[in-house]
Amino acid sequence: MSSLAAQVAEHPRFHLLPQTHQLKALMTIIRDKNTKRSDFVFYSDRVIRLLVEEGLNYLPVVEKEVTTPMGVPFKGVSFQGRICGVSIMRAGESMEQGLRDVCTSVRIGKVLIQRDERTATPTLYYSKLPKDIADRWVLLLDPMLATGGSAIKCAEVLKEAGVKEDRILFINLICSPEGALHMLEKFPGLQIISAEVDEGMDHRKYILPGLGDFGDRYFGTE
Ligand code: PRP
Ligand code: URA
């Protein structure tokens, strides 16, 4: 791991998935350029499910007491507030089902941001968010964090809509160390949950070793 990547992994607001053999095997499949599309989708979905489950661990809870069928009280917890998802179109839409699978009828906002293929500069085209988003915790969904430009633009849209920084959990599969640090510095309340931190980026701002263009591989537009 490079020193920059180690700096990210140790950051208090950056949460790496447990680096288990299972996760490593799933990531190896989706990073392999020879993986066929149906497998890319299947194994990406498995990683996404792990990420969403991990993301929920960073939501605040309050104490709650219930009575079990044995007539005995049990001191547990329940989630404190309401959540919603926001996906950065298009690749982030691949993560919506993973969120729906664990949070039934969750509201999902969408923000269309596209990187210029030549300059990697992001442009915001469209956003549609739940009306009461300022009262919710937001799971921000995008599989790839490269320069951080797209995710930063999206977090700005969320802040303009009244979302507090410390209520944004950004969930992604792979990040570059530069992009992750840029985002953590820009938003001192926001948290990032990621499966792996890579080494850096190439001259076109693609993550290395990375997995190529996630959206193209997932949606079959290569
Ligand atoms: C990809 C990816 C992120 C962005 C990451 O989307 O899904 O949104 O690039 O790069 P950045 O951190 O340098 O901004 P892209 O704009 O290529 O569109 P897509 O979702 O249609 O693939
Ligand atoms: N978007 C991707 O899909 N992959 C990268 O490596 C960078 C941006």
Image (spheres, rainbow, N blue to C red):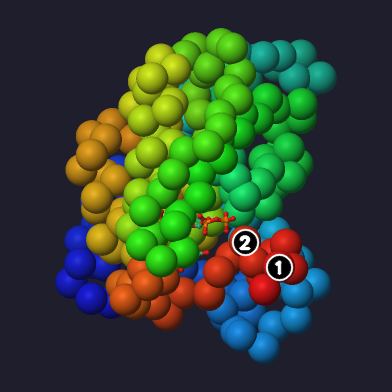
Ligand 1 closer than 8 Å to label 2 CB: yes
Report x, y in % for residue 169. 44, 37
Q: Is residue 150 above or below residue 25?
A: above
The alpha-carbon separation of the residues under discs 2 and 1 comes to 8 Å
Q: Nearer the viewer, mark 2 or mark 1?
A: 1
Query: Label 2 is placed on what type of residue?
Result: Gly
Query: Label 1 is placed on what type of residue?
Result: Thr
Which residue is rendered at x = 39% and y = 34% of the image? 155
Tell me the SS state at disc 1.
loop
Sequence-earlier tag: 2 or 1: 2
Q: Is residue 151 above or below residue 215?
A: above
The label on residue 215 is 2
Cβ atoms under marks 2 and 1 closer than 8 Å: yes
Furthest residue toward bottom: 34
Report x, y in % for residue 129. 58, 23
Residue 75 figure quarter? top right
Tell me the SS state at disc 2.
helix
Badge 1, how many Cα within 10 Å: few under 14, some, many 20+? few
State the count of labels. Answer: 2
Which residue is rendered at x = 56% and y = 78% of the image? 31
Which residue is rendered at x = 49% and y = 24% of the image? 137
Q: Is residue 56 above or below residue 17?
A: above
Report x, y in % for residue 194. 45, 55
Give the side of residue 2 with respect to residue 18, left or right: left
Q: Is residue 136 above or below residue 117?
A: above
Q: Quadrant of the N terminus?
A: bottom left
Which residue is rendered at x = 29% and y = 46% of the image? 183
Residue 208 figure quarter? bottom left
Residue beneath label 1, please? 221
Tell me, yes or no, if residue 84 can be seen here.
no
